[in-house]
Image (tube, rainbow, N blue to C red):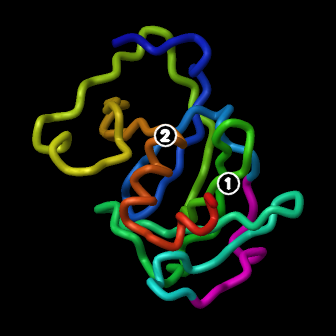
């Protein structure tokens, strides 16, 4: 599968050696994690929230295996907020974030069958040098987080 022109620029989030890529137009803001308001919630899967234009956005931290973490690692320096249908939706904490230009001839690989059978926000794979980049989008990540976290449903209501 060849990259469509409208998704040539991606935001590359890195943490714990994992590289997740999202279409850049789905990112609404990047902030330092210092601005996160830490919260206590029942299921401990949302460790904080960030207010964007008066809207509280839940902030999540994931492990390299995409498990929700209840605490923020000291390496997580950035908070990347995403929108769905033009509305702020959620944010992910990461160690690094950068812009990634995917060339038109970049080939997205399908997910291996074992990865498809489990709930996953990953839609495609991209090999770039020695790195394996997992291609996601905001809607698939939101769906994945909703499955993992009942508290997120409160924000969607």
Mark 1, residue position: 81
Q: Nearer the viewer, mark 1 or mark 2?
A: 1
Horizontal and vertical percent for residue 146? 44, 59
Q: Quadrant of residue 5?
A: top right
Circles 1, 2 touching at the beta carbon (< 8 Å): no
Work out whether 133 lies above or below 7: below
Work out whether 138 lies above or below 94: above
10 Å neighbourhood of mark 1: few (<14), some, or many (≥20)?
many
Q: Residue at x 60, y 51 (%)?
A: 97
Q: Nearer the viewer, residue 88 or 130?
A: 88
Read off the magenta span. Answer: 30-40
Q: Distance from label 1 to label 2 (Cα)?
A: 13 Å
Going by the image, does 147 lie left or right of 83?
Answer: left
Horizontal and vertical percent for residue 104? 49, 10
Horizontal and vertical percent for residue 115? 18, 44
Q: Which mark is residue 69?
A: none
What SS does tag 1 mark?
A: strand
- Which of the two labelled residues, at mark 1 and mark 2, occupies the earlier sequence position? 2
Q: Residue at x 53, y 38 (%)?
A: 22
Q: Residue at x 27, y 24 (%)?
A: 109
Horizontal and vertical percent for residue 134? 37, 40
* Residue 37 on the magenta span: yes
Q: Nearer the viewer, residue 16 or 22?
A: 22
10 Å neighbourhood of mark 2: few (<14), some, or many (≥20)?
many
What SS does tag 2 mark?
A: strand
For the N terminus, the image quarter is top left
Going by the image, does 140 lie left or right of 88?
Answer: left
Mark 2, residue position: 21
């Amino acid at each position: 599968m060849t990259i469509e022109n409208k998704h040539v620029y991606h935001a590359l989030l890195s943490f714990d050696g994992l590289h997740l890529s999202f279409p850049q137009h789905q990112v609404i803001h990047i902030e330092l994690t210092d601005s996160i308001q830490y919260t206590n919630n029942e299921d401990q899967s949302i460790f904080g929230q960030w207010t964007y234009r008066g809207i509280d956005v839940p902030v999540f931290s994931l492990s390299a295996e995409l498990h929700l973490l209840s605490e923020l690692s000291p390496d997580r320096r950035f908070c990347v907020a995403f929108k769905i249908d033009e509305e702020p939706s959620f944010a992910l904490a990461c160690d690094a974030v950068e812009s990634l230009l995917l060339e038109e001839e970049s080939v997205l690989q399908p997910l291996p069958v074992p990865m498809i059978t489990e709930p996953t926000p990953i839609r495609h794979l991209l090999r770039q040098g020695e790195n394996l980049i997992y291609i996601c989008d905001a809607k698939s990540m939101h769906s994945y987080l909703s499955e993992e976290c009942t508290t997120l449903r409160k924000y969607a209501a």
